[in-house]
Amino acid sequence: MRIRSVFSCLLLVVLFNTPGSAAPPLARATFAGGCFWCMEQPFDELPGVVSTTSGYTGGQKVDPSYDEVSAGVTGHAEAVQVLYDPKKISYEKLLEVFWHNIDPTTGDRQFCDAGTQYRPAIFFHDETQKRLAEESKKEVERTKSFSQPIIVPIVPASRFYPAEDYHQDFYKKSPVRYKTYRFGCGRDARLKELWGKAASHG
């Protein structure tokens, strides 16, 4: 009996430490929606989202700094990269939250921030994300209550450069400054105008 018990224990150890029993891989989603300070919180609040990272993507400059991106000389956009568990939250849900946190009717600006570095965009990481993003965009165009067209591009993801540490989780680190900026930029007022009760407020 003791031999059988030991064998059973060893079998359990092997089963729970085989590659097939490892945690499922996480997925990435990348979105640009103007100031990245304001795009972290809506995703952070979602069950299944592991982390968000503010950064720069879509441009040509290698290892850009915030000052360079802000000057509009790098081709990069401020963006957030979302690490999530696809078994707990779908990419479709992330897209829904993205739309309700941006103004999709403007190209090279978001709210009070103007320039290509503040352009909205969906950066897809594979063909499935591309298809789902295109379907989501069509659904927004079909159901929107405003008359302006949707002009958010859906483009392949390129190298993502994390922003400086002081930008990460800015809404937590400097809540007063964050809320002052957000209110002064008119973000929430415009989101409510566009999306009504569906608008997310950080």
Image (spheres, rainbow, N blue to C red):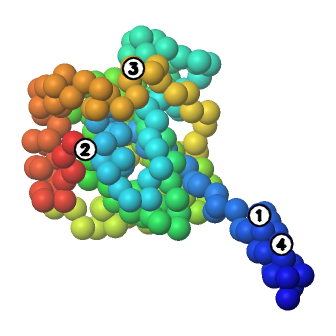
Quadrant of the image containing the N terminus: bottom right
Disc 3 to disc 2, how far (Cα)? Answer: 26 Å
Inter-mark Cα distance, 2 to 1: 47 Å
Q: Earlier in the sequence, mark 1 or mark 3?
A: 1
Residue extending furthest toward the front: 2
User: Disc 3 marks which amino acid?
Assistant: Tyr
Q: Position of residue 151 (x, y in %)?
A: 35, 46
The quarter of the rendered structure image containing the C terminus is top left
Mark 3 highlights which residue?
166
Residue under circle 2? 103
Circle 1: is it few (<14), some (14-19), or many (20+) Cα within 10 Å? few
Label 3 vs label 2, nearer the camera: 3
Which marked residue is nearer to the observer: mark 1 or mark 3?
Answer: 1
Q: Earlier in the sequence, mark 4 or mark 1?
A: 4
Q: Secondary structure at mark 4?
A: helix
Nearer mark to the viewer, of 4 and 1: 4
Label 1 – label 3 distance at C-alpha: 38 Å
Q: In this rendering, does residue 146 appear at all?
A: no
Tell me: residue 118, above or below residue 16: above
Q: Residues within 10 Å of mark 3 (few under 14, many from 20)?
A: few
Q: Secondary structure at mark 2?
A: loop
Report crowding for label 2: few under 14, some 14 to 19, many 20 or more residues within 10 A (C-alpha): many
Q: Identify the element where label 3 is drawn.
A: helix
Tell me the distance, in whole angstroms, between the alpha carbons under discs 2 and 4: 57 Å
Per the image, the residue denoted by label 4 is 10
| Residue beneath the point at 42% across and 11% down | 67
For marks 2 and 1 on the same chain, the one whose residue lies earlier in the sequence: 1
CB atoms at circles 4 and 1 under 8 Å apart?
A: no
Earlier in the chain: of badge 3 and badge 2, it is 2
Q: Hey, which quadrant is residue 96 in on the image? A: bottom left
Percent across and percent down for residue 163 are: 47, 24
